[in-house]
Structure formats: structure tokens, C-alpha cells
Amino acid sequence: MSKQIGKYITHHWCRLIRPFTVGITNTTAKKVPPLDVYEPQIPPYREKADEPLKLKKARLLYQSRKRGMLENDLLLASFAARYLENMTAEQVKLYDRLINLPSNDWDIFYWATGVKPTPAEFDNEIMQLLKEHVQNKNRESRIRQPNLYSS
């Protein structure tokens, strides 16, 4: 008996409440474009004027380690650990542009691994050094990032 009462109440409750719920949409709200059309805006990269070289190298070391994708974290962190300290100011500038101008980290990965051709603006001595580093001719283990500070 209670089963029948439950069905009756549910059925009639739904019929009673339906007119109040149908058509409840916020018609004044801004319509969001579909995800395949909408792409979030990434702020353009601006070089930091008058940034001391030591500070720039520290920033680039951090940015090399925190890319947001494991593949580039491993490649760029090991690259920065090996080469960044001895780079000239001009080389540091090229490396800064290489890791900060492209808006897609997969592009950097594909260029470094040779899957896609490197655009002319990034095809420089630092990119060539990165490509050599990626080849890993010494067969070093790179399954984790190098230590930030030597012991």
C-alpha cells in the first residue's frame, strides 16, 4: 500500500511542479560560445627590461622546471641544469624567448624532438643545443628532474 502511495505522490508532485520548472533559463545571461570556437586568451609575453642576468637565469631555471607538461619539464629542466649557468646574456635572451614566446608547449617539444620543423624565429644556436640535448647521445637517465641545488 505504501508503495502505491509513494508512486502516486511522486507522479502528482512531478505533474504539479513541472509548469514551474519548464522554461527556467536565464535568457538575459551572456551566451558562452561552444568550446571548439572559444579559446581562452593567453596574455602576450613581454620581455623584462633591465632584468639582472643572475635574476633572469634564476627565473628561467624555475620556468624550465615548471612547464605544466612532464615531457618538457624533464627536457628543459635537464637542459637548463646543464647549460643555463654558462650561457652568455645573448644566449639567455634567446632561451627566454624560446620557452616563453610560443603559446603551446607541445610546439617546443615537437621542434626539439624534430617531429615538426622549427620556425625561423626560433631556429638558433640555443634550439640546436636543445635538439642535441634531446638526442641524449650519452644515454643519461632523465626520468626525473635534476636536483635544484647540488649537495
Image (cartoon, rainbow, N blue to C red):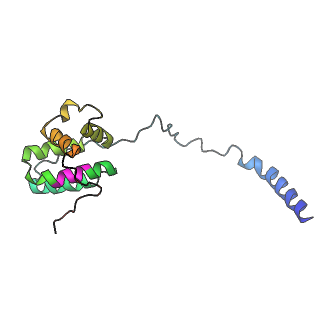
Please tell me which residue is depicted at 25% across the width and 55% down the height of the picture. Answer: 141
Residue at horizontal 19%, vertical 33%? 121
Residue 142: image x %, image y %? 26, 54
**Closer-to-camera residue (60/19):** 60
Residue 62 location (% of width, % of height): 22, 56
145 lies above or below 108: below
Q: Majority secondary structure of the magenta segment? A: helix
Q: Quadrant of residue 45?
A: top left
Pinpoint residue 115: horizontal percent, then vertical percent. 30, 34
Q: Is residue 79 above or below residue 148?
A: above
Q: Quadrant of residue 117?
A: top left
Is residue 15 visible from the viewing direction of this image? Answer: yes
Picture quadrant of residue 1: bottom right
Q: Quadrant of the C terminus?
A: bottom left
Magenta residue span: 75-81
Q: Is residue 88 left or right of residue 146?
A: left
- 69 and 15: which is toward the camera: 69
Is 68 part of what is drawn in magenta? Answer: no
**Vertically, is 54 above or below 27?**
below
On the image, the x and y values in percent for residue 34 come to 51, 37
**Viewer-side residue, 41 vs 24:** 41
- Whether residue 68 can be seen here: no
Q: Number of callouts in the render? A: 0
| Residue farthest toward the right in the current orientation of the protein | 1
Of all residues shown, which one is farthest toward the bottom? 151
Residue at the (13%, 44%) spot, across then down = 93
